[in-house]
Image: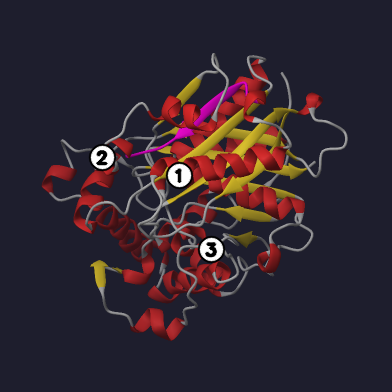
Amino acid sequence: MKRVSVIGVGKTKYGVLKDKTLLDLAVEAASKAIEDAGITPEGVDAFYLANYGGSDFVNQSHLAPYVGAALGLRRGVPCIHIENACASGGSAVREGIIAIMSGTATRVLVVGVEKMNTVPTPKVTEFLAKAGDWENEVRVGYTFPSAFAMVARRHMHEYGTRREHLAAVAVKNHSNGLKNPYAHMRKSLTMEEVLGDERVVADPLRLYDCSLITDGASAVVLCDKNSVRENLKKTVDVLGFAQTNDTFALYQKDNLTRFDATVEAARLAFKMAGIKPQDVDVVEVHDCFTIAEIVAIEDLGFVPKGEGGPATLDGLTSIGGKFAVNPSGGLKSKGHPVGATGVDQIVEVVLQLRGEAGERQVRGAEIGLTHNIGGSGATCVVHILSRG
């Protein structure tokens, strides 16, 4: 099979972008990635667009050719829309990699985009809840904050996890996001501020435990490694990847403190890459809620079960720690434009491995991992990248 490299990345500012349409955002990110790759739109062989809720948020479907036409992709290029809840971006990148490995494409453009700030927050919550089990859970009051609140409460019960551990995730990620000029909320937080905040979203989760409602887009250009020009600036290679599923609904899970899709995707990706968790320098995980980051670093094998909270509080996951987790600021500070998130995780790791992450640079980073989940952990996509 062919080897795959990332040769271009691009993104928009993340935030509440009232003056930008979904099309504006997608085209901006894609154009930056194409320019970064040193190609033109005519050089793209296949296009994958990750988007979760275009039909709900902006009343637009058939999004991939919609964006492809605006980009000026040549006629005949396949344009494919990937919707896999919050894992849409990671799934789209995976499909792009597979297209190159199969030999059906040499250069693939992947764009993730979401325009969410078009409706009031209750409507956003309703739209996002469609990624859950509507028949058995959502119609009786399930939302994703309530789901992850149950995960947090069970983790506290089984492992002694405390609110201080959740707060440490928020404080760290906001500190990182402050160094990211593209982040949605560039605001520092102290432990005292987080622990003193009593705005309950779903107990034990408070406002600062929850990710943001964000507009934004991110893009990558993938290429057959053997066709990369020798003079092209710093490339990043795909070492391993995997996508797995688990039971769909939360009530079906055997253990609320573990996402089996993450455990299995990590196992398969590490096996393909031929490395172990201790070889990884920088990690972007799906911290839709603070407890999600704690569970993720445990499920991925970076720390034993139950030690994710203490590891964060002790600084092991900081930019200068043993393994840097979410130097971008994560979903918590950088923002969570649902369809874009998994793509942007790749963008961040590529910048880190190139040594182009500015103030948030992880020194000497050579191997990075991304972790993107959808729904109640029903889908997980893991990618492992290395400096080319």
Image spot of residue 135 (x, y percent): 15, 35
Question: Which residue is tagged 1?
Answer: 24
Nearest the camera: 94 or 68? 68
Please provide the residue range marked out in magenta. 44-53
Quick check: 136 above or below 100? below
Which amino acid, mark 3?
Gly
N-term-proximal mark, 1 vs 3: 1
> How far apart, in angstroms, are the residues tagged by discs 3 and 2?
27 Å
Q: Secondary structure at mark 2?
A: helix
* Residue 50 magenta-highlighted: yes
Nearest the camera: 22 or 383? 22
Q: Name the residue located 54 percent from the left edge and 71 percent from the top edge.
A: 172
Which amino acid, mark 2?
Asp
N-term-proximal mark, 3 vs 2: 2
Image spot of residue 156 (x, y percent): 36, 66
> How far apart, in angstroms, are the residues tagged by discs 1 and 2?
18 Å
Q: Are marks 1 and 2 in contact (CB under 8 Å)?
A: no
Q: Quadrant of the C terminus?
A: top right
Q: Name the residue located 28 percent from the left edge and 44 percent from the top edge.
A: 57
Q: Is residue 297 left or right of residue 374?
A: right
Q: Quadrant of the N terminus?
A: top right
> How far apart, in angstroms, are the residues tagged by discs 1 and 3?
24 Å
Q: Residues within 10 Å of mark 3 (few under 14, many from 20)?
A: many
Q: Residues within 10 Å of mark 1 (few under 14, many from 20)?
A: some
Give me the disc on residue 329. Answer: 3
